[in-house]
Image: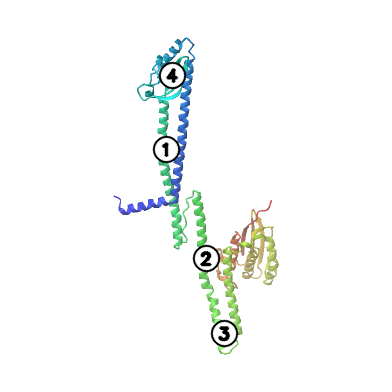
Amino acid sequence: MISSENRAHFSASCSSLRRSTPFRLAVTFGVLFVVAFIFSGAIIYHILSLGLGRDVDQSLNEMNSLIVSTYEPGDTADLINTLNNYASFQSTSDGLYSLTDAGGRKLAGNFAAPRIPNGVYTVTSGDVGLKGHERYRMQVSTVGPYSLVVAENFNDADEMLRIVLVSFEWAAAIVVATAIGGGVFLAVRAQARLDRVANTMNDVSHGALDARIPITGNGDDLDTVAIQINAALERLQRLVESMRQVSADIAHDLKTPLNRLRLTLDAAVAGNEQQADVSALLDEARNESDRINATFEALLRISQIEAGARKERFQATDLDAVLSVISEVYVDVAEDAGQSFRIAGRAPAVIWGDRDLLTQMIANLVENAINHCAAGTRITLSLRRQEDRAILSVADTGPGIPAEERDKVFRRLYRIDKSRTTPGSGLGLSLVKAIAELHSAEIALADNHPGLRVSIAFPLMPEKA
C-alpha cells in the first residue's frame, strides 16, 4: 500500500506540475492541436458527405435519363420493359423503381409509389410504405402522363460515412491521448531542466559559486540560456574570488606600509615631545600616506573600469597614433635607464575604444618592462593586423615571468618575489587586464626567448564600404 507520506509527496508533485509554465503551455498547445484536428475532421466529413450525395444524385439522374429515353408518346411498352428489367435485378432494399399512371395505378417497377411531387428527396422505407429502415435517394419525374420514381439505396454511402466517422473517432482518441501524454512528458522534461536551473541558482545563493547548470547538448533555447547563465556565474565566481583575493592582498600588502606610517608618526610624536626637528619624519609619513592613497585610487579605478563606467567615452581610435605618443614619451625614459626602446612594426588599426585608457594601458606595459628589466634590455613595441583583429605586442629581453606565475600576475596587488624589491603596488597588470577586457580584447603572456612578450588582440572596427 502507498503510505500517506508518499501520497502527499505525489499530490504535491502533481500540483507543482499543474502550476508549471511548461505544463500549461503543453496543455494549451495540446488543446489547440485537438481542436484543430476535430475541426479539420469535421470539414473533411462534410466534404465527403457532400461528394457522396453528388455522386448518388448524378447516378440517379443518369438512370432516370436512360429510362426516360425509352419512352415514345403512345408507346409505353419499352418504358415498362426497361423499368421492369431494372427492378428484376434489384430488391427493394437496393433500389426502388415505379411507374404509375395519373390515377396512381402501378404500371411497372418493384413497388407502388405514393403520390409524390417531382423532385429529388432523401426518404426512408416507411416514407414510401415499405418495411425496414432503409434510406434512399429518390428522384421523381414526369414521363408523358405517367409518374416515374427511381431511387437508390443510401446505405452504402451511409456505411462509408459511418466507417469514416468511427475511424475519425478512434483517430481523435489517439490524438487526444498522444497530446495529453506527450504534453505531460514534455512538460515534465522541461520542468526538470528548469528545476535544475532553479537548484543551481539556489546553490549559488547559498555560497556554492562553483555550481553550474548541466548542459544537455541539444543546442535548444534552454541550453542557450543555461550556457549564458553559466557564463555569468563563471564571471561572478571570478569576481567574488578576485574580491576575496583583493581583501587578503590588501590585508597582507598594505599592513606593512600602514605599520611604517604608524612607526613614523610615533617617532614624530616622540621627537616632538623632545622638541627635536620632526619635519623629515612628517615628510616621510606624508609620502607613505600618498603611496597608500595611490594604491586605493588604483583599486577604485580598476573597479570602475571593470564595471564599464568608461564605455560612454568610446570612439573610433587609431592604435597606431597611440603608439606614436608612447614612443615619443618613453624613448628618453628607456635611454636614461640604459635600455633601448623602439617600435618594431606598425599598421593602421582603428578600434572602438577610449583613447586615454588605451594610452594608459600601453604605458603601464612599457613602464613595467623599464622598471623590472636591467640595463641593456631591448624593449620593442609592435602593431599588426590579423584578419579582423589588431595585435598589439610589448616585448622585452629581460628576466621574463615564469610560466606558472603568468596567470597570477593579473591579480590585484600580486607581485612575484623578484619584483618586490622594485617600486610598485602590484596593480599595473591588473589595470592592463581590466582595460583590455573593457575593450573586448584578449591578453596573453608568452616567452620572448629571452624575456616576456605581452600580446593584446583587439577587434577591429568594420571598414566602411
Q: CA distance from mark 3 to mark 4?
A: 134 Å
Cα–Cα span, label 2 and label 1? 61 Å
- Mark 3 residue element: helix
Q: Earlier in the sequence, mark 3 or mark 4?
A: 4
Q: Which residue is mark 4?
A: 149
Q: Give the foreground label among 2 and 1.
A: 1
| Residue 242 numbered tag | 2
Name the residue located 37 percent from the left edge and 24 percent from the top edge: 126
Q: Is residue 254 above or below residue 351?
A: below
Q: CA distance from mark 2 to mark 3?
A: 37 Å
Q: Residues within 10 Å of mark 1 (few under 14, many from 20)?
A: some
Of residue 115 and residue 19, the one placed in the foreground of this image is: 115
User: Mark 4: which amino acid?
Assistant: Val
- Residue placed at 44% from the left, 17% from the top? 148
Residue 234 in the image: x percent, y percent? Answer: 51, 59
N-terminal label among 2 and 3: 2
Do the numbered discs 2 and 1 sit on residues whose CB atoms are within 8 Å?
no
Dot 2 crowding, Cα within 10 Å, few <14, some 14–19, many 20+: some
Q: Which mark is residue 383?
A: none
Give the CA distance from mark 2 to mark 4.
100 Å
Asked whether disc 4 touches disc 1, contact meaning CB atoms under 8 Å apart, the reply is no
Question: Cβ–Cβ below 8 Å for labels 3 and 1?
Answer: no
Q: Residue furthest left?
A: 1
- Tell me if 190 is positioned left or right of 342 in this view: left
Q: Of the residues tagged 3 and 4, which is closer to the observer?
A: 4
Measure how far apart labels 3 and 1 are at the Cα level: 96 Å
Residue 268's mark? 3
In this view, 254 is above or below 71: below
Q: Which residue extends farthest bottom?
A: 274
